[in-house]
Every structure is written in structure tokens, then in C-alpha cells.
Image: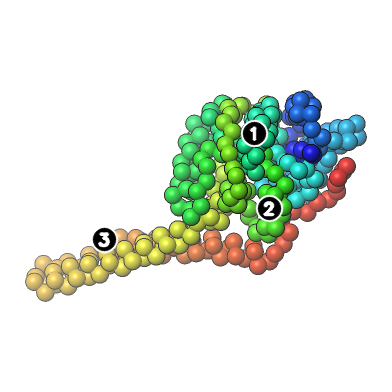
Amino acid sequence: MLLSVIVPCYNEELVVNETYKRLSEVMKQTGMDYELVFINDGSRDQTFPLLYQLSQTDPAVKIINFSRNFGHQCAVTAGINNCNGDLAVIIDADLQDPPEVILDMLDIQQKENANVVYGVRKKRDGESKFKLLTAKYFYRTLNKMSDVQFPVDTGDFRLIDRKIINEFNRLHEKNKYIRGLISWMGYKQLPCYYERKERFAGETKYPLKKMLKFASTGLLSFSKKPLKMAIWTGIASVLIGLIYAIVILIMKIISPESFVVGWTSIIFIVIFFGGIQLLTIGILGEYIGNLFDEAKDRPEYIINEKINL
Ligand code: UDP
Ligand code: MG
């Protein structure tokens, strides 16, 4: 049995050595053969040289070096596509997901013969109130909007087996929302509860802008509800428009003299309906943008070099 550990790294010079140490210790405790697949996602700091040094002394350290920064989900995808393990663990480089939890995951996997063991965050230390709140509501809203049900408070930290890896390798969609795709596959998936820690060092590589992009990827690739909502907003505004037209007509008939030509109401209506139109066109645009990405069919990532792989 070979166990692969997939670690996406973007500007993680402050943590990679410690991550390597902690992961190696845990791997030795498992008694399994293992490989540590680090994906250097176009880091602009010393991440790559540090990883390279490790790979020269330890053949279990394997590196996929991207040609530029493609993003977290692309890095994990590259790891899954290129790993050799019968089992694989996806884990962040920053030690927020404690490597020791992998032992519990393996335990559950072996006892229950599960295909996926996903980490569920019982508690999250050292993260802003804003992040906790937005994450909480995002996962719950996504579940309401989507046809597939996802476990809540779950990141990409999980153990997957060869069946899942092989199925994953058949998926060619762009803008992947990996945790969603793996839930969507079915098979036997079990939770493993753990406490998410503070980052070991460095700062988050997911600023608000990336968080929003990620949330929209999750929503757009698993739900057509926004399109339906656009239709319903359209219907609602047509109804409001009709009622208002009738009211005006009646007013004009009953008392034409008291009827003042309303500038305010016209402006209000123009802004309101203009807004709704732009909003619904925007929703359409998001889906068309995704179709555009699929149609171009560019690779999700470009590998500059592989080391020890
Ligand atoms: N990451 C990456 N490419 C990126 C952004 C992040 O490979 O463009 C990696 C990062 O190095 C880390 C993981 O993805 O290992 C999660 O990122 P981070 O810890 O910054 O996210 P957070 O835990 O704050 O959501
Ligand atoms: Mg983190």
C-alpha cells in the first residue's frame, strides 16, 4: 500500500520545512510506504528552493513545479492526477489541518472500508469572525441551492482511495470545486472530526477576492438555481409593472385633473427595473463565462518540471 500526501504550496517558505518534518513523522507512524507530493503553485519566494533541497535528501519528497500561479484547486488537481498512491491525502501546507489527523482518517478508512474520509472542522482557531461567518453561511446556502448535498464545514482535507482518484482523473471540467466533486461521486464517504488550528506561519493566500471567486465556482458548478431565480425575478417585476400600469390607468380615468406627471416614480421604476435586468444578465454572463472556459479547453495547469516523480 502506497500513501500519497498532496500538498499545494503557494509562497509557503515559512512553513514548508516544518510541514515536511511533521508529515514525515506521521507517515513513519503509519508504517506504510509513502510519498509527499508538493505542488509549487508558482511561488515567488523561497518555497521551491527549499522543497528542492528536501527532494535531494529524501526520495519520498516529490515536486510538481508549475510554470506560474494557477490557484489552489488546480494545484490539488495536479497532485491527484500525478500521485501514485493506493490512497491519497489532500492537506494544506500551513499545518492548519494537523497531520496527526491523518492517522485517525486511516483508522476510519480501514475499519469501515470507506472510499473517502473527509475532515469536518469542529472548531477553527485563529481565523477572523468574518471568515468563520461567511464560510458557515456559504456551505449552508450552497446546500440549499444545489441538487447534490454536501457535508458542511468541510474543506479539501480528506483521504481518498484509488477508485476516487481514478474517477477524478476522468473529470475534465475547468474551474473545479474539488470538495463538491468528490461528494458528488458517491461511494462510501465518512466524516472525521478535528480541530482546525491556526496557521503555523505566514498569512492566508485566500484574500476576500479569491474567497468570492471560489464561492462562485462552487455555486455555479453545482447549481442552476441562480438562473431560475433570474426567471422568477423577471416574472415578479413584470407583475409589479402590470399592477402599477393598471393603477395609473384607473387614476387617470377617475380623476385626470389630480394626476400629476411623476418624475420621481419614473426614475424609481427605471432604476429598479434597469437593476433587475443588469443583475439577471450578469447571472447569465457568469454561466456563459464558464461555458467559454470549457469551450477553449485549455489545460488547467502547466507543469514546468517534475522532481522524483
Ligand atoms: N494555495 C495554492 N495556490 C494559491 C493559493 C493557496 O497552492 O493560489 C495553497 C496554500 O499554499 C495552502 C492552501 O492552498 O497550502 C490553502 O491556502 P490558505 O491556507 O492560504 O487558505 P486558508 O486556509 O486561509 O483558507
Ligand atoms: Mg490555511
Residue at position x 62%, y 65% in the image: 292
Image quadrant holding the C terminus, namely top right
* Residue 264 marker: 3
Q: CA distance from mark 2 to mark 1?
A: 24 Å
Q: Is residue 145 left or right of residue 36?
A: left
| Number of numbered markers | 3
Please state which of residues 208 and 215 is positioned toward the viewer in this rendering.
215
> Pointer 1: residues within 10 angstroms few (<14), some, or many (20+)?
few
Residue 136 to residue 176: above or below? above
* Residue 168 marker: 2
Residue at position x 68%, y 43% in the image: 160
What's under tag 2, amino acid-wise? Phe
Which SS class for mark 2?
helix
Which SS class for mark 1?
helix
What's under tag 1, amino acid-wise? Lys
User: Are the residues tagged 1 and 3 within 8 Å (C-beta)?
Assistant: no
Dot 1 corresponds to which residue?
A: 111
Please state which of residues 16 and 176 is positioned toward the viewer in this rendering.
176
